[in-house]
Amino acid sequence: MEVVQSHRKSSSNNVIVSTLPLYRSAPPLEVRLEDFELFAMDRLRVLKGISDGLGRGKKPEEMEKLIADLWKANMRHPQANEEANNDIISHFVLRLVYCRTEELRKWFLSIETTLFRYRFRFESSEAQRALMSEFKLPYKAVSNAEFESVKDKLGQVARSMGQTLAAADAIFYKVPFEEVPELVAGRRVFIHKGHAYVAMNQVVSLVVTQFRSYLSKALILTNRKWTSTVREQEKDRLAPIVEALCTSYLGPDYSQPNEVGEISLKDIYQIAKTSFPLCMRHLFEKVREDHHLKHGGRMQLGLFLKGVGLKLDDALAFWKAEFSPKVSAERFDKEYAYNIRHNYGREGKRTDYTPYSCQKIISSTPGVGDHHGCPYRHFSEENLRAALVRMGVSSRAVEDVMDKVRNRHYQLACTLTFEAVHGSSCDAGINHPNQYFIDSQRILQPKVDDVNSLSFLGALCESTLV
């Protein structure tokens, strides 16, 4: 079934149809469970890429390229009708996923609106006018006579933005100024008698305002329906998928060590100081200080250590040694060793468990006495500042990190920490603690190899002189 027609002129009535849907109603399609999840994850990659770009302060032209690339990589399909179907299905699946709490709704509303804004800008002016008609916006184009009367003022506004006024084909709409607050705040429109003159290339602000308002209301209604009926009806089928999708990790699998290779027990203490992200460094320090961690902390750190290459025998030796001041060898073997072997797939179902992603760690809820979770989200400001200073983050960089934390960009805060500690950019952003470790080792290992090479050359020169 073709949900959205391709962007073209209809031969019968010469009407332009846009490829950009308004998501007014869910498509009457049969969707397999695997496609339900697959389509959602494809769109989620786009939305999270947009979120990262906004958090890093990318300029509008950079965001335009980023969104085009993200859409092409994750949503593009050779057949236009299939792409349209995937577009609408994935939106409604994620609407269901992100309707469930105020925080989730706020994030989804913001990023979907941004995606809509840029996709609208990609459309032709004819398709944009068609979309305005679909929204039933009560605005008519300014007449030629009225345009001539304000042309000089419109030209001044255009020149102030470094643009020119193309009078020959210029189309302006006169709207109440309160309906385009972002254009008024940016001094990008001429205002006269309570009305703003909005150029055709600015109507995105009008349409986006309508889209955001509609989607905000739709999310509330979806939440009510999910809470009242759907969640219970689908508790064994859809509910587990829906509830897991918002914390889904979309990157590489770190269940096995990759190019960094295996890490020996004797190396782990030094590497923890140089290449562990703050969440794992905190847990590592706590287990050495308290000689114990609760279950959540053991799982988070244990799977991370497995992913960085610590072998099972070394993992057992590490935990046993660190717990020994408080836990006897016999008790350790009885109460703790099984879970460690279980994480490595040697007990129970013999599942090869994957280290926790940033999303999973951020969404956790540590209780009193717990040390797992994301420091950028769960630490007090005072404790976080102190931890960053201990990692060697400069005072200026600390302020940048705290700014991201205050705006709830926790992964970007971790990315800035990485860049400050290593003196190297991380354009991809940090999405997984094991990614942090691998990227750190890539930067630091060549320096170690250089030192080893110099030592070797020095020894060789000394032997030659002798």
Image (cartoon, helix red, strand yellow):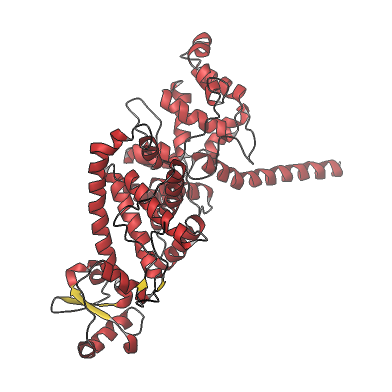
Lateral position of residue 315 relative to residue 137, left or right: right
Q: Position of residue 375 (x, y in %)?
A: 39, 38
Q: Is residue 394 visible?
A: no
Q: Residue at x 32, y 57 (%)?
A: 23
> How many numbered circles does the render carry?
0
Lateral position of residue 274 relative to residue 295, left or right: right
The quarter of the rendered structure image containing the C terminus is top right
Residue nearer the viewer, 404 or 130: 130
| Vertical arrangement, residue 303 with respect to residue 210, above or below | above
| Vertical arrangement, residue 450 with respect to residue 21, above or below | above
Lateral position of residue 153 relative to residue 382, left or right: left
Q: Residue at x 53, y 11 (%)?
A: 329
Q: Position of residue 384 (x, y in %)?
A: 37, 40
Residue 367 figure quarter:
top left
| Vertical arrangement, residue 160 with respect to residue 37, above or below | below
| Vertical arrangement, residue 210 with respect to residue 409, above or below | below
Residue situated furthest front in the rendering: 12
Q: Position of residue 243 (x, y in %)?
A: 36, 38
Residue nearer the viewer, 213 or 231: 231
Residue 198 figure quarter:
bottom left
Residue situated furthest top in the rendering: 330
The quarter of the rendered structure image containing the N terminus is bottom left
Q: Position of residue 77 (x, y in %)?
A: 50, 59
Q: Is residue 353 visible?
A: yes
